[in-house]
């Protein structure tokens, strides 16, 4: 059975009401037939629901689908993507451990690695993600964790995941990949050598900007440790959000095809415009990692960036000229969104770091939605022409 079929047909066990669509299980706890059953379930001698901080039929259904899509052994859902990223580290690392991470990360990830885990004696070395030799050179005897995004946010840097995974051979290192931009439709990092794959389900997994959520999929030996941390600290996904996310997965394949198709067409239409320094999209031949993208991803994804000449002043004028696209820090929505990373999602990064990551004052991230591509091309071209 194909994944698209499974994403639609996987469902929590039907109740006596014989519902066709899974109901909402909006309950904090569950009951036992007697005290002995309660004891057995708590002792893990018998399976069963206990408490929605631990498990819930809606959450379990969502996780089962994500595990299937990512070709994983196990999975765990969280209240947000950042909760999932933090739990992957907090659940597996201890004081004295060392992390190697790509320097092109979402702003909050950098804050975790420089301000939070550092307080507990966990050091992090940042390296250029595409430079596999830099990863290898950064490995220390106490290195326990690799963390990266591919494609990265917002610079769309790609990392050769099999080459990075090869560095773990003979070493006790966990490779965790943020797969938010690609989704399991475009790439499955576990098949490329990763141990954990992490998503902000708030983005493409939802697809309509409605709910928050996060998920980790991967090897069971690591998920067991992360689950212990999560159960006792409580970053749980709500049943309602899980219900939304599970239903959204039914159309993820179709949505990602259309997002990618629209983004490719828009990138091609904007490339070479007089007011732009550059257009970046993984499946444009001008992208520095084009060959890797074609090898590692099914489609180019729904994100592109443009670098507007004249910096922030011109970006503001451009944003005012847009008629269809929304201005928001989010992405992965059915509606096209424009973001200025330097002043929003990556505002806390030091100026010199922004320069090294290519986050200029003129950089605009475009999360291309599902609108008519002709309407989108017309809107972006008229907005660029208006500031020419």
Image (cartoon, rainbow, N blue to C red):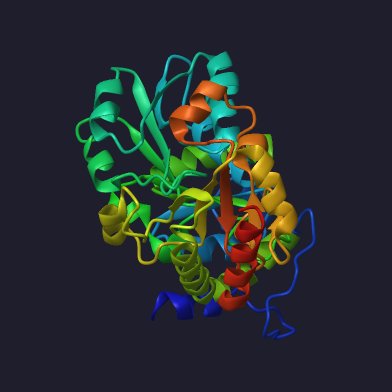
Asked whether the viewer can see residue 10, the reply is: no
Outermost front residue: 388
Residue 348 in the image, given as x and y percentages of width and height: 63, 27
**Residue at image point 46% right, 62% down:** 301
Residue 144 in the image, given as x and y percentages of width and height: 36, 27
Residue 352 in the image, given as x and y percentages of width and height: 51, 22
Q: Choose between 38 and 93: the one closer to the eye.
A: 93
Tell me if 145 is positioned left or right of 40 in this view.
left
**Residue at image point 60% right, 22% down:** 116
Asked whether the viewer can see residue 178, the reply is: yes
Residue 82 in the image, given as x and y percentages of width and height: 61, 40
**Residue at image point 58% right, 27% down:** 349
Tell me if 350 is positioned left or right of 225 in this view.
right
**Residue at image point 68% right, 76% down:** 22
Residue 43 higher or lower than 109, as above or below: below
Outermost right residue: 27
Q: How many marks?
A: 0
Q: Choose between 321 and 69: the one closer to the eye.
A: 321
Residue 293 higher or lower than 169, as above or below: below
Tell me if 338 is positioned left or right of 110 in this view.
right
Q: Quadrant of the N terminus?
A: bottom left
Q: Quadrant of residue 43?
A: top right
Q: Quadrant of residue 300?
A: bottom left
Q: Quadrant of residue 345?
A: top right
Residue 265 higher or lower than 134, as above or below: below
Tell me if 328 is positioned left or right of 176 in this view.
right
């Amino acid at each position: 059975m194909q994944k698209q079929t499974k994403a639609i047909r996987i469902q929590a066990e039907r109740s006596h009401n014989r519902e066709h669509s899974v109901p909402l299980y909006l309950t904090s706890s569950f009951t036992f037939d007697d005290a002995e059953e309660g004891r057995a379930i708590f002792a893990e001698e018998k399976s069963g629901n206990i408490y929605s901080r631990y498990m819930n039929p809606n959450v379990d259904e969502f996780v089962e689908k994500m595990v299937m899509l990512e070709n994983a052994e196990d999975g765990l859902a969280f209240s947000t993507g950042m909760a999932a990223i933090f739990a992957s580290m907090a659940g597996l690392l201890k004081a004295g451990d060392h992390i190697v991470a790509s320097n092109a990360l979402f702003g909050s990830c950098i804050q975790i690695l420089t301000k939070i885990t550092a307080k507990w004696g966990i050091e992090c070395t940042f390296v250029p993600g595409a430079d596999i030799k830099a990863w290898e050179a950064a490995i220390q005897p106490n290195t326990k964790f690799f963390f990266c995004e591919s494609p990265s946010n917002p610079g769309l840097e790609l990392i050769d995941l099999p080459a990075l995974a090869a560095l773990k051979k003979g070493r006790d290192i966990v490779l965790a990949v943020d797969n938010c931009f690609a989704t399991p439709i475009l790439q499955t990092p576990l098949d490329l050598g990763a141990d954990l794959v992490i998503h902000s389900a708030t983005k493409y997994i939802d697809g309509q900007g409605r709910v928050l959520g996060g998920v980790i999929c991967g090897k069971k030996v690591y998920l067991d440790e992360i689950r212990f941390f999560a159960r006792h600290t409580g970053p749980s996904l709500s049943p309602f959000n899980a219900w939304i996310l599970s239903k959204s997965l039914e159309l993820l394949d179709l949505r990602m095809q259309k997002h990618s198709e629209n983004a490719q067409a828009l990138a091609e239409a904007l490339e070479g415009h007089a007011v732009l320094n550059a257009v970046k999209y993984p499946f444009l031949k001008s992208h520095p990692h084009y060959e890797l993208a074609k090898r590692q991803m099914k489609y180019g994804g729904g994100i592109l960036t443009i670098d507007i000449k004249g910096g922030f002043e011109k970006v503001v004028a451009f944003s005012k000229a847009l008629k269809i696209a929304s201005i928001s820090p989010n992405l992965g929505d059915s509606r096209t969104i424009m973001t200025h990373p330097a002043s929003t999602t990556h505002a806390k990064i030091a100026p010199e770091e922004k320069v090294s990551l290519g986050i200029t004052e003129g950089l605009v991230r475009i999360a291309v939605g599902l609108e008519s591509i002709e309407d989108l091309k017309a809107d972006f071209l008229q907005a660029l022409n208006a500031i020419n």
